[in-house]
Amino acid sequence: MNDLIDETPAKRSTKAPGLRTEPLRTEPVRTRKHKMGSKSEDWSYIPESLQNILRAKGLAWEYKRTHYFGKEEEPEYRRSLEENGWEALSLASIPEFRDLMSKSWSKDTVEKRGQILMVRPQYMTDEAREEEAKAASDRVKGHMAQLNRAGPNEAERTLVKVKRSYESGIPVE
């Protein structure tokens, strides 16, 4: 045990003991990670080259959950995804995505951390975003109408200014 602690960096092996015959970080691995744009810190990262393939096919993509707190996702959720046009990306139809998975991966889908990569036509995603924006706008208009209908002394009017702009993203406090 002490010889492991006292071992100088020059004496240390670059190979994992008993597991591999080649070094842990070989040049081909580094080259592949650089070429594919792999970002180990972001599991959902999709290289720009693969995004361009999906764009050329007119597809939108998102990761959707397959497991929730370690349990298999409920059939109703799967059905709602199908009704909204989502289907799992097939590695048989777009084999370039096989590079996102390990060599031993045997399924026809891209799955990571309880999520599955799904695609649908881009126009359906555009329509869904328009519907969401309209629903948000309608809620704001409805609340503004409620405030305007309230007579004197019917509602406490502590609201001084209503922000009427819409922003994407999560607010940071």
Image (cartoon, helix red, strand yellow):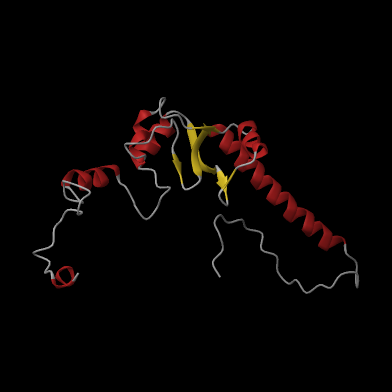
Q: Is residue 49 visible?
A: yes
Position of 173 with respect to 91 (left or right) is right
Q: Is residue 82 above or below residue 9?
A: above
Name the quarter where the C terminus is drawn: bottom right
Give the camera-side residue of 164 and 102.
Answer: 102
Tell me where residue 150 appears, x and y as whole percent: 88, 64
Tell me where residue 84 appears, x and y as whole percent: 62, 34
Q: Is residue 121 visible?
A: no
Give the camera-side residue of 16 and 32.
Answer: 16
Tell me where residue 71 appears, x and y as whole percent: 59, 47
**Which residue occupies 13% across, 58% down?**
13
**Which residue occupies 70% across, 47% down?**
135
Name the quarter where the N terminus is drawn: bottom left
Q: Quadrant of residue 164?
A: bottom right
**Picture mark count:** 0
Q: Quadrant of residue 101?
A: top left
Q: Is residue 18 above or below residue 50?
A: below
Tell me where residue 105 appears, x and y as whole percent: 37, 36
**Which residue occupies 37% across, 37% down?**
50
The furthest residue to the top: 93
The furthest residue to the front: 1
Position of 39 with respect to 140 (left or right) is left
Q: Is residue 94 above or below residue 49?
A: above
**Which residue occupies 70% across, 65% down?**
162
Give the camera-side residue of 72 and 99.
Answer: 72
The furthest residue to the left: 10
